[in-house]
Amino acid sequence: MASIVRLILGDQLNLNHSWFKKVNPEVVYVFMEVRSETDYVLHHAQKVITIFAGMRRMAELLKKQGHQVRYFRISDKDNQHQFAANLKRVIEYFNSKRLEYQEPDEYRLDLELKSLNKKLGIEILSVSSEHFIDGRDGVAKHFQKDAKRWVMESYYRRMRQRTGMLM
């Protein structure tokens, strides 16, 4: 059984994420093709199909590496088409103690995932998606230290000094 459930969203298909460096039998990765994501606004069919194809490929690659994967296809009879309902089912099946997810890029999803602890009743941990050079609160921290000058140039200068990268 997997004591940790890790949710992977359709825009987080990064095989280089630190989560995937080691195979851990205590972890199950969950992918979901859900109507709550495809239907909240009008999406082009090709966009949705491309995201689903990418998710399916990523899940396949993780399985080949030896990771445990639970994949909800859009047409699966047991797909509840909502994150909370599907996660609840996975958590109960695996008797999991913790849910982990990568910080979503969408504010709407961020709020939804943060509210899951009330619905699921287990420990929930959010980690960096590792999509960006700086952390989510990096700009805010910078301007707290440099409150006199609200100029992005000072932030970029600090990032160049910290990373050695030209921005």
Image (spheres, helix red, strand yellow):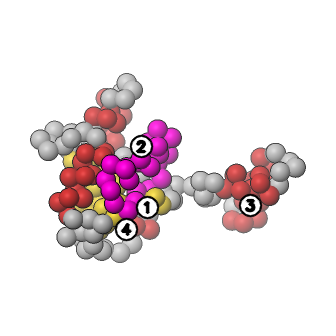
Is 43 included in the stretch rendered in magenta? no
Residue holding disc 3: 160
Q: Nearer the viewer, residue 142 or 49?
A: 142
Q: Please identify the residue farthest to the top as the structure is shown.
A: 42
Q: Earlier in the sequence, mark 1 or mark 3?
A: 1
Mark 2 and mark 1 in contact? Answer it, CB < 8 Å. Answer: no
Q: How many marks?
A: 4
Residue holding disc 2: 112
151 shown above or below 23: above
Q: Position of residue 107 (x, y in %)?
A: 51, 41
Q: Amino acid at mark 4?
A: Phe
Marking on residue 67: none
Q: Earlier in the sequence, mark 2 or mark 3?
A: 2
Marking on residue 125: 1
Q: Amino acid at mark 1?
A: Leu
- Disc 1 crowd rating (10 Å Cα; few below 14, some 14-19, many 20+) is some
Q: How far apart are the alpha carbons under marks 1 and 3?
A: 30 Å
Mark 1 and mark 4 in contact? Answer it, CB < 8 Å. Answer: no
Segment colored magenta: 101-124
Residue holding disc 4: 20
